[in-house]
Image (tube, rainbow, N blue to C red):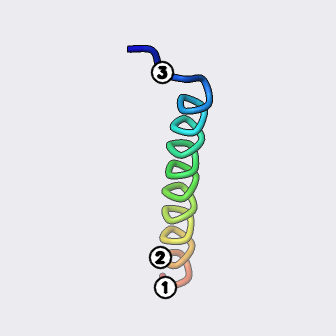
Amino acid sequence: MKIPFKSYWFIFATIRQFRANGLNLQLQDSIELGDAQ
């Protein structure tokens, strides 16, 4: 089964977006914890 290049790129971009969102959430949590202390 061959995956079309566009589909592969879309999956890669989606995973990258999820990772970016995860990093942003972690940064926000760290900032909130820093403000609380």
Q: Position of residue 8 (x, y in %)?
A: 54, 28
Residue 29 as seen in the image, left or right of residue 24? left
Q: Where is residue 16 in the image (x, y as percent from the top left)?
A: 56, 43
Instruction: Look at mark 2 in the image and give the residue it sits on.
Output: 33
Amino acid of disc 3:
Ile
Labels 2 and 3: the sequence-earlier one = 3
Instruction: Look at mark 1 in the image and give the residue it sits on.
Output: 36
Between disc 1 and disc 3, the foreground one is 3
User: Observer-nearest residue: 18 or 1?
Assistant: 1
Specify the quadrant of the image occupied by residue 24.
bottom right
- Mark 2 to mark 1 CA distance (whole Å): 5 Å
Badges 2 and 3: C-beta atoms under 8 Å apart?
A: no
Amino acid of disc 1:
Ala
Where 4 falls versus 10 (above or below)? above
Between disc 2 and disc 3, the foreground one is 3
**Crowding at mark 3 (Cα within 10 Å: few <14, some 14-19, many 20+):** few
Mark 2 falls on what kind of element? helix
Q: Identify the residue at horizontal 51%, vertical 65% (top origin).
A: 25
Residue 6 as seen in the image, left or right of residue 2? right
Specify the quadrant of the image occupied by residue 2.
top left
Residue 3 image label: 3
- Mark 1 to mark 3 CA distance (whole Å): 48 Å
Where 2 falls versus 26 (above or below)? above
Q: Where is residue 35 in the image (x, y as percent from the top left)?
A: 56, 82
Badges 2 and 1: C-beta atoms under 8 Å apart?
A: yes
